[in-house]
Image (spheres, helix red, strand yellow):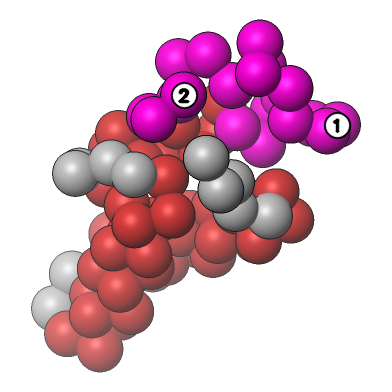
Amino acid sequence: MLLPDRNTIDRLLRHYRTQERSVLARPCDLSARRRFEDTAYTLCVLMGERTAHAAVSAAERYVAQGGPASRQALEGLPGA
């Protein structure tokens, strides 16, 4: 299974959280909402999940593992 770069996932997670706060602060800002949804979609694709919540959870587990990805460390991730 091809795994995404941890640094990329970490960057996307931080971006997602920043955008989440922005959307919560300005719920009527359609541009901010669109960027937030685009980032959520990207996380879904990279983590192989159908919902943003599941993708963020999987991404957080993946980034927290750190170091080289071993088969044992990948248990619980989609497709593992």
Mark 2 or mark 1: which comes first in sequence? 1
Q: Is residue 1 left or right of residue 49?
A: right
Write down the region rendered in magenta: 62-80
Q: Is residue 14 above or below residue 47?
A: below
Q: Nearer the viewer, mark 2 or mark 1?
A: 2
Residue behind mark 1: 67
Total marks shown come to 2
Identify the residue shown where x is 33% and y is 79%: 35
The percent coordinates of residue 42 (x first, y second) are 37, 65
The percent coordinates of residue 57 (x first, y second) are 42, 31
Give the amino acid at mark 2: Ala
Give the amino acid at mark 1: Gly
Is residue 50 among what the camera can see?
yes
Q: Main secondary structure of the magenta part?
A: loop
Q: Which mark is residue 24?
A: none
Q: Quadrant of residue 64?
A: top right
Q: Residues within 10 Å of mark 1 (few under 14, many from 20)?
A: few
Q: Is 27 in front, or is 14?
A: 14
Is residue 25 among what the camera can see?
no
Q: Is residue 73 left or right of residue 24?
A: right
Identify the residue shown where x is 86% and y is 31%: 67
Residue situated furthest bottom in the rendering: 31
Callout 2 touching callout 1 (CB < 8 Å) = no
Q: Is residue 25 above or below residue 3?
A: below
The percent coordinates of residue 2 (x first, y second) are 56, 48
Q: Is residue 53 above or below residue 13?
A: above
Q: Residues within 10 Å of mark 2 (few under 14, many from 20)?
A: few
Q: Which mark is residue 80?
A: 2
**In 3D space, how far apart are the residues under numbered discs 2 and 1 (Cα atoms)?**
17 Å
